[in-house]
Amino acid sequence: MNKEKRDAEMEEQGARMLEDEQQETQQEEQRADKKIAVIVARQGEALPSEFLMSLRLMEQPAGFTMELVEVEGRAGLAAAYGQAMEASTAKYKIYIDERVRILDSSLFARIVRLFEKRADLGLVGISGTKILSPDGIAFHSTRRIGSLRLAEEARTVSWGRVLGEAEDVLAVDGFLMATQVDLPWREDLFHGAAFFDAAQCLEFRRRGLRSAVLGQEEPLVEFLGESFPADEAGRRAFLAEYATEALPLVSILMPTHERPEFFKLALESALAQTYRHIEIIVSDNSEDDRTEELMKAYAADERIHYTHDPTLSALQNWRAALDRACGEYFAYLFDDDLYAPEKIERMADALSMEDGIAFVTSYRRAIDAEGNILDDPVVGPPPVAETSRIPGELAIYGLLDKQANFIGEYTTVLLPRRAKEIVREILQREPRTVLPDVECWLQLLEEGDLLYIVDPLSYFRKHEGQAGADPAVQIEGARAWARLLRERAERESGMRRKKMFEQADLIEMMLRARGR
């Protein structure tokens, strides 16, 4: 009996202890929910007195407590912030650079109110970017929003206006980063003072949580010092880990037909792109299996998607690659041409950072069968002295006035996804046009401007057996130019209309004189 009584008492005592522990845990969680930790990575022996003073002036949300968590930051901000995160039980954590001075005393209260309204919001900052530049450096993006007061220069840097109470972004800047959920900082990747901020936003995104920039009429903070240095090791680590999530996919389309030697060189130039998020769509309509055998060496590369169908015609082969493209942008690379390593990166940067651009092209060089540079009068010099945005209408008249494709072949350009339907319609048009690229450019330039890069970013190979070298094709090309001039002239008036009709008449007169 005594044993049974003792067992019952012990069981009751254990239940009370468990209940006390649960109550204490619940109380701790409640206290943590009403706690703000201000986390600072100190670079020197002590935090600047002006920084500490700005914190003392902050408005404390009703019912909340605040704590300052100070950590050594010389080993890297990701490691420092990770250490501080583990040391604090606060639900709300505000990671702030010691060179920042807060200008709005209600900033912390605003952040907490925003978090309380939005459970899907993981991270809030005072500036950030909606799209990342292809080099991975957030400050190079032209899609930035928010503002910052630069103390040493006595001026305000204002990027895009924040719409509403807060606006979602891909990444916020590391000047000030507030969270309501704890996620590990990637100290395994970053050991300096750059890229940790964008990486953390993408870690939140992987877990379904958004990042946002707080609304502001005036700058919310002042910054004393220089921006974060973008170390190359950190940049490479960032792109290796996050490029497929942070950068738009670019599809490189490679129709090929029985040119395995040239094709291999073209494929290697696609694989050598500095842009880190590409897919390579190879559509092979060869009647032999030489290219198929060659492709076995690339079977492990997940970027490459290869199909072989000898029943396809040349234009069907072009369309087959187009139909399989999934990218936000796409570019053709024909099997005898080459890309410069930075082609896609520079063109994707221009397309993603500029509004109103129909497509991007560049200067291209002609090469011979051995890859030697040719002085080709068809290519000629760049139409502009420096990289420029050319109004669409002006580019159209430039094409028609000279009857020369200064924009380049399909290999030369990078196109947005919305251009796929225009390209597809031109490629399946009957009767077939001998100027599919020019007709495509004319249609696209009705919708926007041309961005022309003066550096050579592609190489057009000239060799025996090309269709463009056939005199019959050249004659058909002249007829096509005359038709395009007449079609455009019908839409014009005045001297421009008169000149286009006269140019079309001249082309047709010359063809008649040659008995064509």
Image: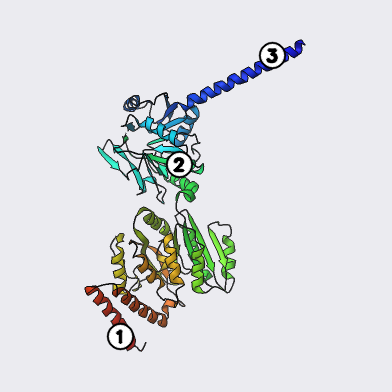
Task: State the SS at label 2.
Answer: strand
Amino acid, disc 1: Met
For label 2, count other residues whose C-alpha is less than 10 Å away and answer few (under 14), some (14-19) or many (20+): many
Residue for badge 3: 9
Name the image quarter holding residue 195: top left
Residue for badge 1: 509
**Lower sequence index among marks 2 and 3:** 3
In the image, taking residue 322 as reference, residue 142 lies left or right, namely left
The x and y percentages for residue 47 are 36, 27
Q: Nearer the viewer, mark 2 or mark 3?
A: 3
The x and y percentages for residue 470 are 42, 80
For label 3, count other residues whose C-alpha is less than 10 Å away and answer few (under 14), some (14-19) or many (20+): few
**Lower sequence index among marks 2 and 1:** 2
Q: Which mark is residue 481?
A: none
Assign the N terminus to one quadrant of the image: top right
Q: CA distance from mark 1 to mark 3?
A: 114 Å
Q: CA distance from mark 2 to mark 1?
A: 65 Å
Residue for badge 2: 210
Task: Name the image colouring.
Answer: rainbow
User: Can residue 340 be spotted in the picture?
Assistant: no
Front in this rendered view, residue 455 or 166: 166
**Lower sequence index among marks 1 and 3:** 3
